[in-house]
Image (spheres, grey):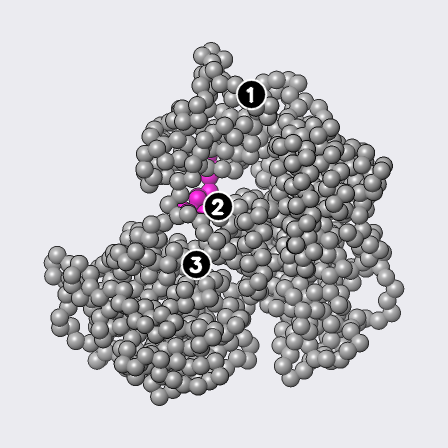
């Protein structure tokens, strides 16, 4: 285990190393892969030096300095970005997240924002309507201190909302449950906590009956998972990809998982092996403390022996995490002085100090075993009583076994003291703090405690002054979305809060003497957190030889109005020298990229699909054509009569076959299986295009172009139905969209299974629909037809055809026409090409394609950043700045 080295100490102390030039560069003169120039490159080195340019070669920074000096590293293949004065920072690091838990929180269904008891009850009613009687309804971490009423929903309110379903509304260690949940858990007026663990069941003083409020003993509530969708390994990895992409979108390139489970670590390892891990992850492995001391010490040793203990710079176990006390949001943080009687927290005992889950005499041998194993120990320690307990244990151990090399940690440590800060400095304790708690919750704490008692609430300035390595985190535990999440993981909100110490609902700062400077707040989320990750020699500053983890943002954090910092936008994010995020304001296609012809003479008519080993497949000249990775054109399936093509999650080629009016699957050996050729005994029109959801369900469109003879899919009035169908894994076929659209063509399920996008392209009828719609998808794969939303209307020209999506949700829609369309309705006002939209339908850019009719597209290449396009029998390709979504190998 490395100790906090000299370079780290110099950065924390702000001591600049000797330097006599305006540029730092490697001695080699090899050309750079990337050069960013004409900007404000804030290195966050010991001197906090600022330059105008930076160069990257491979994974590392090779030069930082003036434009002229750095541009000397330019070669014929160097990609050059003119920053136009924009700020460049080291990649931001979040010192406290729970990625897998957060990513999977809405896996089964979306959960709305809840600000009032009415919101909570509305959600529970909705779930009760969707779930069968007797199924559990669980809602967690909607903290009552963040609700307008600042109380739990009562047992009676929960009974009314869901009379036939057991309900648990949990916040940290506490919960509110309804009558059925109490009954199923065997909790009545005679129930007592007898297992020696913490907590109690709140009871009505008049009747002795349980009120439904459960304090720190939710372990007695016999909940069962009742989600419609059971999460599988691929689901977890897929959701993590989404979350990490969103982390990248706000500038985060590194995180510490504080309480990682074995399944989370396995998911990170799998993403790393797929080269799909887009943030660095340091792991504090969760260890329970309810067994014997010997069993806990055995668990600690198992963590120390884990192969990832010797992991690399992308993924590594750094220590263990446990829980020492309760929380400030639930009135259970362990304090040095009593909380005081509180209506907000339902505290009636004037001597109540909160909950300490591990007494000192039990904590001591656990921490000793951790330090002896060379691991970092940290514990959830919110109250100043818990902080004092843990620091005293560190101090006692330090007398016989130095702890500094393991970087012992305090996690949360919201309530501190002058003494605690001195102890941290003396022992080399690092501190992990979440400013967003000050932003969200300080108004409640000020009501409860008054400002005087909050003098050392998140004392960031005092910690900096004491040279303690303190880093900023979010405690992100639920939802994807940097502001909608619990807790918000937008680092710019954390920065602004650490600068102003102003919480919501208040205009006056909480002890402004503890506010950080702008330089310090940047260090807080970069250099300091690299120390908490044990990676200060490799990341955290923009210095030659370090990994090229960096971001470009839209404003100067050193000079912009302080109240605008939370609105800062990340424009580009680099990790290990690779660009992993480009904002929608940045170019979508690579600067200088040109449309290239891959194949022609009818080979690129429709339906491109990609297999990394076998190449690009397309429909054309009546066949399924194959362009091998070495550029050879072949016929894969002769006279197949296909249109849309797509690889499923097993690598089989799915195809819509409009000639034979069916949907098929061709396996890797070339065997063809008919998946469906009729619905309710009647032939389809002309199956056209298809898409998959995360459960492997196939959605395909069924329009009819050309002759209208023998149309069998009709409604009760005899009108032709040109809708969308779903094929379930068991073979069941369901029509999910009927006459809500005129003529379904391209279809696409969004990455999170929430939306079905449908291209409605009745292009050969005067006045026909040429529109792009979005429908909400339900967890069971059905379509909410009432949710139909028009995203874009092509008017009189040829409208949308096939469409795909990149990892940031942008839609790439082939469409338009470069020749007259139906008689008397020219389409020259809608040019043919690829229209790129934001997920909500804003047109971002247009790529013109010269052939007469542009039909479809797909992402290809090892990095998934090559877009292939079909049109007029020609197969094109062009490079994009952002990877696309693919189904094989599975995203």
Mark 2 vs 1: CB contact within 8 A: no
- Label 1 to label 3, Cα distance in Å? 47 Å
Mark 1 vs 3: CB contact within 8 A: no
Residue 55 included in the magenta stretch of the image:
no
Side of 159 relative to 760 (left or right): right
Residue behind mark 3: 751
Q: Position of residue 517 (x, y in %)?
A: 74, 49
**Can I make out residue 458 in this image?**
no
Q: Please provide the residue range marked out in magenta.
A: 106-116
Residue behind mark 1: 194
Task: Say what secondary structure mark 1 lies in.
Answer: loop
Q: Is residue 62 above or below residue 713?
A: below
Mark 3 vs 2: CB contact within 8 A: no
Q: Is residue 590 above or below residue 307?
A: below
* Residue ID at (74%, 78%): 68
- Label 3 to label 2, Cα distance in Å? 15 Å
Pair 2/1: label in front: 1
Task: Say what secondary structure mark 3 lies in.
Answer: loop
- Residue found at the very far top of the displayed protein: 206
Q: Position of residue 325 (x, y in %)?
A: 65, 32
Mark 3 burial class by Cα count in 10 Å: few <14, some 14-19, many 20+ = many
Residue 108 included in the magenta stretch of the image:
yes
Q: Nearer the viewer, residue 647 or 620?
A: 647
Q: Nearer the viewer, residue 223 or 520?
A: 223
Side of 502 relative to 806 (left or right): right
Mark 1 burial class by Cα count in 10 Å: few <14, some 14-19, many 20+ = few
* Residue ID at (20%, 64%): 678
Q: Earlier in the sequence, mark 3 or mark 2?
A: 2
| Residue 37, image quadrant | bottom right
Residue behind mark 2: 105
């Amino acid at each position: 285990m490395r100790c906090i080295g000299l370079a780290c100490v110099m950065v924390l102390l702000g001591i600049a190393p000797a330097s006599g030039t305006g540029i730092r560069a490697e001695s080699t003169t090899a050309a750079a892969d990337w050069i960013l120039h004409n900007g404000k490159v804030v290195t966050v080195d010991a001197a906090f030096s600022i330059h105008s340019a930076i160069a990257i070669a491979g994974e590392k920074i090779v030069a930082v300095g003036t434009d002229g000096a750095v541009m000397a590293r330019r070669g014929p293949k160097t990609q050059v970005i003119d920053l136009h004065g924009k700020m460049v920072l080291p990649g931001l690091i979040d010192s406290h997240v729970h990625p897998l838990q957060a990513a999977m929180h809405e896996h089964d269904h979306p959960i709305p924002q809840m600000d009032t008891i009415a919101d909570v009850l509305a959600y529970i009613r909705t779930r009760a309507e969707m779930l069968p009687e007797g199924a559990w309804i669980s809602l967690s971490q909607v903290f009552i201190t963040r609700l307008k009423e600042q109380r739990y929903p009562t047992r009676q309110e929960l009974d009314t909302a869901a009379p036939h379903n057991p309900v648990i509304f949990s916040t940290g260690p506490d919960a509110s449950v309804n009558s059925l949940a109490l009954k199923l858990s065997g909790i009545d007026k005679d129930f007592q906590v007898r297992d020696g663990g913490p907590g109690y069941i709140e009871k009505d003083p008049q009747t002795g009956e349980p009120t439904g409020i459960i304090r720190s003993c939710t372990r007695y509530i016999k909940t069962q998972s009742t989600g419609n969708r059971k999460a599988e390994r691929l689901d977890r990895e897929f959701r993590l990809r989404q979350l990490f992409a969103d982390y990248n979108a706000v500038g985060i390139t590194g995180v510490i998982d504080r309480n990682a489970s074995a399944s989370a670590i396995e998911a990170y390892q799998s993403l790393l092996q797929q080269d799909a891990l887009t943030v660095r992850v340091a792991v504090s492995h969760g260890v329970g403390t309810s067994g014997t001391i010997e069993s806990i010490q055995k668990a600690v040793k198992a963590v120390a022996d884990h192969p990832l203990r010797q992991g690399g710079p992308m993924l590594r176990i750094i220590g263990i995490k446990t829980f020492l006390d309760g929380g400030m949001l639930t009135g259970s943080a362990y304090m040095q002085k009593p909380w005081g009687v509180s209506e907000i927290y339902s505290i009636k005992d004037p001597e109540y100090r909160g909950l300490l889950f591990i007494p000192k005499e039990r904590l001591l041998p656990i921490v000793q075993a951790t330090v002896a194993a060379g691991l970092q120990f940290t514990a959830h320690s919110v109250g100043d009583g818990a902080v004092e307990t843990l620091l005293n244990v560190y101090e006692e151990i330090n007398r016989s076994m130095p702890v500094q090399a393991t970087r012992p940690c305090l996690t949360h440590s919201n309530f501190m003291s002058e003494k605690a800060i001195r102890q941290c400095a003396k022992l080399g304790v690092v501190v992990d703090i979440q400013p967003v708690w000050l932003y969200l919750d300080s108004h409640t704490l000020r009501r409860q405690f008054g400002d005087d008692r909050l003098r050392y609430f998140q004392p960031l300035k005092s910690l900096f002054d004491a040279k303690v390595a303190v880093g900023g985190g979010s405690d992100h535990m639920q939802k994807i979305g940097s502001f909608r999440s619990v807790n918000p993981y937008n680092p710019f909100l954390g920065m602004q809060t650490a600068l102003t110490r102003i919480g919501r609902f208040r205009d006056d700062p909480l002890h402004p003497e503890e506010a950080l400077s702008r330089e310090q707040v940047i260090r807080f989320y970069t250099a300091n957190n690299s120390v908490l990750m044990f990676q200060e020699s490799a990341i955290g500053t923009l210095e030659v030889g370090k990994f090229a983890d960096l971001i470009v943002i839209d404003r100067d954090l050193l000079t912009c109005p302080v109240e605008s910092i939370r609105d800062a936008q990340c424009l580009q994010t680099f990790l290990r020298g690779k660009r992993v995020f480009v904002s929608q304001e940045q170019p979508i296609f690579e600067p200088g990229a040109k449309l290239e012809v891959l194949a022609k003479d009818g080979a690129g008519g429709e339906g491109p699909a990609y297999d990394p080993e076998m190449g690009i497949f397309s429909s054309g000249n009546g066949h399924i054509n194959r362009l091998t990775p070495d550029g050879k054109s072949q016929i894969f399936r002769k006279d197949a009569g296909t249109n849309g093509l797509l690889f499923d999650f097993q690598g089989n080629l799915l195809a819509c076959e409009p000639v034979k009016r069916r949907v098929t699957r061709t396996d890797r050996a070339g065997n063809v299986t008919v998946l469906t050729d009729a619905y309710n005994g009647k032939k389809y029109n002309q199956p056209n295009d298809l898409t998959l959801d995360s459960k492997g369900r196939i959605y395909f469109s069924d329009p009819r172009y050309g002759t209208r003879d023998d149309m069998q899919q009709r409604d009760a009035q005899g009108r032709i139905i040109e809708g969308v169908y779903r094929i379930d894994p068991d073979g069941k076929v369901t029509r999910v969209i009927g006459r809500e659209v005129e003529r379904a063509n391209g279809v696409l399920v969004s990455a999170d299974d929430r939306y079905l996008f449908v291209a409605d392209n009745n292009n050969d009828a005067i006045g026909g629909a040429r529109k792009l719609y979005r429908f909400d998808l339900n967890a069971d794969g059905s379509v909410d037809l009432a949710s139909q939303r028009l995203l874009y209307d092509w008017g009189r020209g040829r409208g949308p055809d096939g469409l795909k999506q990149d990892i940031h949700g942008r839609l790439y829609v082939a469409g338009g026409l470069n020749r007259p369309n139906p008689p008397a309705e020219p389409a020259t006002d809608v040019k043919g090409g690829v229209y790129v939209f934001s997920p909500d339908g804003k047109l971002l850019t247009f790529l013109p394609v010269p052939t007469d009719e542009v039909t479809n597209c797909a992402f290809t290449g090892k990095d998934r950043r090559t877009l292939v396009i079909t049109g007029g029998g020609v197969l094109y390709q062009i490079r994009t700045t952002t990877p696309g979504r693919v189904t094989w190998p599975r995203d």
